[in-house]
Amino acid sequence: SQKIEQNSEALNIQEGKTATLTCNYTNYSPAYLQWYRQDPGRGPVFLLLIRENEKEKRKERLKVTFDTTLKQSLFHITASQPADSATYLCALDINRDDKIIFGKGTRLHILP
Amino acid sequence: EAGVAQSPRYKIIEKRQSVAFWCNPISGHATLYWYQQILGQGPKLLIQFQNNGVVDDSQLPKDRFSAERLKGVDSTLKIQPAKLEDSAVYLCASSRGAKRGEQYFGPGTRLTVT
């Protein structure tokens, strides 16, 4: 069955640095991959979507890359701020099974 | 635009009792999803509706969970009878079109089964 792994449960980054989060998957390549932000006690908020034929997507300080050979997506936050502290979830939409699968998330702490 | 509304926000019940959650999606959104999120895990899709038809309910424990979306707008998710392992946050989300894409989530209902 399809598995999705986010690199670590928690990540501490100094304010102003670039935070890089990893999402790895096994088996089938997804039609597309999404990144969401989730704050405690709240529902996830959509950030970016990248399709299987796209290498990179940007939105303000956010950048997502998608490598179907490595079966990996990287999510970058440049010039990180304490307000970026949250849990970040990746989600795969699997064409073959018509399923959507979320990773467990990575808790990001930006230290002032 | 108004976001996805869910109620109640919190619910505590004893095992073997029943419970129902309500969701009102963003106006005009054709697709509605119910997710279960256990503490420390990512959301797990329980059921997906396209208008008022079910698209995917493969992960819904149908012996105890049921969901409906009448008139293709509001939806309710019911658990009967509840088990301890059903303690989780139940998230409702909606999206515009028929294909999954950007989803808008509600605040969730935190269910505690004792």
Image (cartoon, coloured by chain):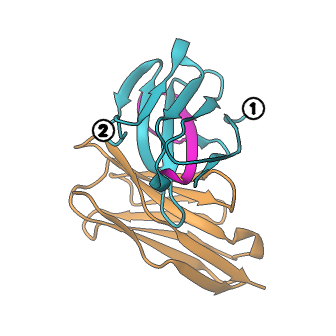
Q: Position of residue A100 (x, y in %)?
A: 37, 47
Examine the image and state in which quarter residue A81 appears.
bottom right
**Disc 1 or 2, which lies upstream in sequence?**
1
Q: Position of residue B8 (x, y in %)?
A: 70, 38
Q: Are marks 1 and 2 in contact (CB under 8 Å)?
A: no
Q: Which mark is residue B58?
A: 2
Within-10-Å neighbours for mark 2: few <14, some 14–19, many 20+:
few
* A43 sits to left or right of B34: right
What residue span does the magenta drawing correspond to?
B86-103
User: What is the C-alpha distance between the residues marked 1 and 2?
Assistant: 30 Å
Q: Which chain is cyan?
A: B
Label 1 lies in what chain? B
- Mark 2 lies on a secondary structure that is loop
Label 2 lies in what chain? B
Image quarter in which the N terminus of chain B is found: top right
Q: Looking at the image, which residue is at 54% across and 33% down?
A: B95
* B47 sits to left or right of A12: left
Between disc 1 and disc 2, the foreground one is 2
Q: Looking at the image, which residue is at 52% across and 67% down?
A: B40
Give the colour of chain A.
orange
Q: Amino acid at mark 2?
A: Ser
Examine the image and state in which quarter residue B88 appears.
bottom right
Q: Looking at the image, which residue is at 51% across and 23% down?
A: B30
Q: Which residue is mark 1?
A: B2
